[in-house]
Amino acid sequence: MGELSRIWRESDHRYRLVAHECGNCKRIFFPPRDVCPICHRDSIGKMREVELSGKGTISSFTVVHDSPRAFKRQRPYVLALIDLDEGPTITAQIVDTPLDQIEIGKRVHSVFRRIHEDGPGGIIQYGYKFAVDLS
């Protein structure tokens, strides 16, 4: 189990936002796709990996007050639609930001957080979240 944990933590994509860009139409997709949904067959073999900056703008958000049991300790929490600078729109949690500082149009940046741990010697799962740029 320890070897699997180490391999997972050292994965090339673990601490980066990685997308795919279609070499045909140049659109960027997150999460990565093997085939462009616009170009279809013309994109086969032309999708290339790109690292996203993790910067974007809040286009919509909601404050979650009633959540599944697994998220009870985090309530209330904010889920937002974020327009990334590179083009894709993603859904992500906003963290490290007072609720009164979260607004549509605010700039955000990605942060990585531990999401789950499978016991003391198990896999630690990390994921991306976003924080508002307060400066």
Image (cartoon, rainbow, N blue to C red):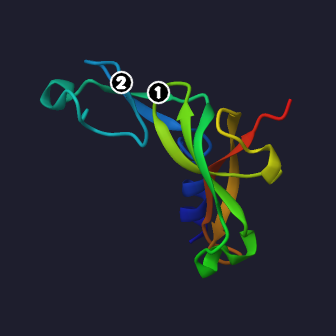
**Does residue 48 sit above or below 102 in this rendering?**
above
Residue 25 drawn at (x, y percent): 28, 18
Looking at marks 1 and 2 on the same chain, the residue that comes earlier in the sequence is marked by: 2
Residue 36 drawn at (x, y percent): 25, 32
| Left or right: residue 3 compared with residue 26 | right
**Does residue 42 sit above or below 103 in this rendering?**
above
**Residue 35 visible in the snapshot:** yes
| Left or right: residue 3 compared with residue 112 | left
| 1 and 2 marks in contact (CB < 8 Å) | yes
Q: Quadrant of residue 63?
A: bottom right
Helix, strand or loop at disc 2? loop
**Does residue 56 sit above or below 122 in this rendering?**
above
Q: Which residue is mark 2?
A: 27
Q: Which residue is mark 1?
A: 87
Q: Amino acid at mark 1?
A: Gly
Q: Nearer the viewer, residue 125 or 53?
A: 53
